[in-house]
Image (cartoon, helix red, strand yellow):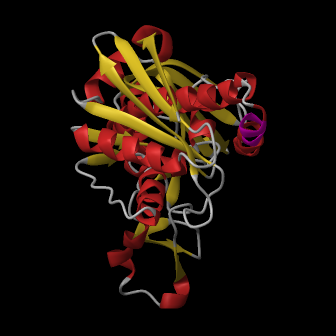
Amino acid sequence: MKEITQSFEIKDRIKYPEIFARYHHNGDVYITIETNGLSSERNRIISFSAGWIEGDKIMTLIYASTNDDDELSIIEKAIETIKRADRIVTYGGDTFDLAFISGRAEVYAKRLAIGESYDIKKSISPLKRLLPSGSLSLYSLLEEMGLADPSIPDGKTLVTLYKTFIKTGSDRYIDPVNKHSIFKLTGIMNLLTLKDCLGINRASVSIEEMASDENSLRVKGKTDILSPIRLCFRLPGIELSFIGKEFYAVFELCGGKLRMYFPDPASYVRLRSDGSLIPKELASSLDKSSYEKVTKESCFSLADIPKDKKQLESYIRSLEKM
């Protein structure tokens, strides 16, 4: 087993250090593992990596396999590190990293005792519906944050590099594996900042620019929540996006009018005669064949474009909550 320690300046590795500091706890230890497969029954751990904060530096420690017989040593170091931590922070660790370590520990009659742990992926899962890619993959999110590194090998390449390292003993094959681990560790720290996005449905907006033609209304402005990645709220005829501290909205117009969506489709019905949207309670005396149910996507009425920016800002805030 090979032990590798490194340190990095927070400002060089964390894109939004102020947001990171808001959610990082003293005593947090960030962990990730590399394996030669996805099954804890058939495959093994080839490295265990941990990172923590000391002052203005990120400290990292990697326990890397140097032969096919040192997995137990890596697992013992992992158990020791996890036991000492005040809180273990992972990305997807509840279902993979910690579960895999626990499964492999049992093979050697060892037990992994996990105290407090925090899985960022589970925490930010409500954002999935707002992501343009629809993916909560660590690599996808880091790419959307502008933190992708094309020199980092993918999973299959990692396994090939590791096998070649075992055969040759040459560091040129294991160095990319360790670089991948550092990328994941600092990536997990960066993804902690996405917790700020969970408040996006409470964001205040301030319109700065408006432009329209016969087909659409385009709006641009500022918001009080910084979104490290692009988040999109979509309804038919409307796209509302947040990135950084700015928002953008595009409203398709129908005969020069705006779709005004209502938040509770179960409370409304649409009259078949003229297409009017009315409260469901008003339809109680009508024949059921005279109206139809509406969905989130069809629960709207057409209205003139508000002349007052405050009215439109209020409508945009209501869209965030849908």
Side of 53 where 61 appears, left or right: right
Q: In this view, does 302 lie above or below 132?
A: below
- Residue at (39, 57) in percent of width and height: 263
Q: Is residue 2 above or below residue 269?
A: above
Magenta stretch, main secondary structure, is helix
Residue 91 percent across, percent down from the top left: 46, 44
Residue 321 percent across, percent down from the top left: 38, 48
Instruction: Judge whether residue 92 can be spotted in this image.
Output: no
- Residue at (78, 32) in percent of width and height: 168
Side of 14 where 272 appears, left or right: right
- Residue at (75, 42) in percent of width and height: 163
Q: How many labels does the image show?
A: 0
Residue 178 percent across, percent down from the top left: 60, 28
The image quadrant of residue 173 is top right
- Residue at (73, 34) in percent of width and height: 165
Q: Is residue 278 above or below residue 207?
A: below
Magenta highlight range: 163-167
Of residues 2 and 254, the one drawn nearer to the viewer in this rendering = 2
Residue 220 percent across, percent down from the top left: 53, 22
Instruction: Judge whether residue 221 can be spotted in this image.
Output: yes
Of residues 302 and 3, the one drawn nearer to the viewer in this rendering = 3
Of residues 169 and 213, the one drawn nearer to the viewer in this rendering = 169
